Amino acid sequence: MNVRRHHISAAALAAVTALGLGTLTACSSDSAAAGNTDKFDVVASFYPMAFLAEQIGGEHVNVTSLTEPGQEPHDLEISAKQTAQLQESDAALYLKGLQPSVDEAIGQSGIKTKIDAATLTSLEEHGAEVGGHAEEHADEHAEEHADEHAHEDGHAEGETAHEDEHGHEHSHETEGGKDPHIWLDPVKYAEVAEGVGKAFEKADPDHAADYKKNTEALVGKLNDLDTTFETGLKDRKTDVFITTHAAFGYLAERYGLTEEAISGLDPESEPSGARVKELAKTAKADGVTTVFYETLVSDKTAKTLAGDAGLKTDVLDPIEGITDTSRGDDYFQVMEANLKALQTALGAK
């Protein structure tokens, strides 16, 4: 989808007072202001960044999210009020390339501490098919599967699917066509957490010891989650799962799975008829039982493919936001729900 950019004039900025954004959690102050509180004020671009800020900052931070619960992050337009709030905050935590309007606003702001999560771990290019080729988790079936299907429609691993064929601008990619969904791999998310912790320590040295302790605790929980996924996905009947769009490439690589996406990295791009037919064949050949869709995007395409191929549908949540319909109240709970959904779909014991 094309993300619309919202330009804020200097006159508009001058006219806007420091009005409050909705606060994210109880960690935020009662004033509901994003800046000028007696805490370390952090503006986060969307839920996965806000969650890190909360977990690491604890009682010392006031966290606000630019993206409202239930809002697809890529649809975000930065308002004049939000831009003014950035100016009043101590730090901004974002993932460059995911939300161009956020990148622009943060780039133009005078905020002292700008933390780009994309610089804190390695990003990769992912296409409509992502095979589980992470060195420590690679297995023969995943490699064979990738070889069999990579040539069929040009979606070899590392390509950005449908970009040329349909002319879509993939706002779901960072610069250079890199996949931004790093938070869905607990190991990569832990790497980002470590970098955020160090940035908080430097920016707010009075509370550095607490930030360090909180970061270590969060990284420990993410390492435990990695172990839970590794153990929970053993003894599965198939390595292949189908999703509406390619959000789970890092997760697939981490655990030796193969993600087949109906669309590419853009959740709203329309798949070709050839791609849908190919996936129906893949499902039959690889024992796929389920087509996954996500909470913030229409399930129409998933249900159409599932109906044609005689498959079930279920939710695999990319955790771009927590809503009343989410299968959990925070990142860890929803990731555990994702694991259960994958175990069922892949026939894991």
Image (cartoon, grey):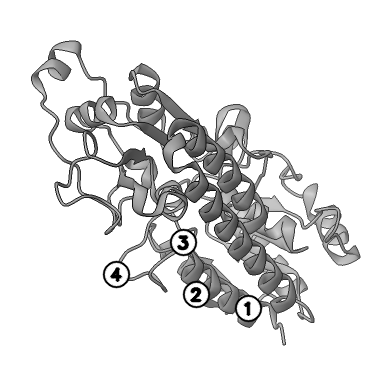
**Circle 3: residue type:** Thr
The answer, for residue 170, to whether it is visible in the render is: no
Mark 2 and mark 4 lie on one chain; the one further toward the N terminus is: 2
**Circle 2: residue type:** Asp
Please tell me whether mark 1 or mark 3 is closer to you in this view: 1
The answer, for residue 147, to whether it is visible in the render is: yes
Q: Nearer the viewer, residue 188 or 217?
A: 217
In the rendered view, does 114 fall on the left or right side of 173?
left
Of the numbered discs in the image, which one, if any, rests on residue 301?
A: 3
State the SS at label 4: loop
Residues at circles 2 and 1 in contact by the CB criterion of under 8 Å = yes
State the SS at label 2: strand
Of the numbered discs in the image, which one, if any, rests on residue 314?
A: 2
Residue named by callout 1? 345
Of the numbered discs in the image, which one, if any, rests on residue 194?
A: none
**Circle 4: residue type:** Asp
Q: Write down the quadrant of residue 9 in the picture.
A: top left
Extreme-bottom residue of the structure: 349
Q: What is the CA distance from the residue labelled 1 to the residue labelled 4?
A: 24 Å
Mark 3 and mark 2 lie on one chain; the one further toward the N terminus is: 3
Rendered location of residue 332, percent (x, y):
50, 67
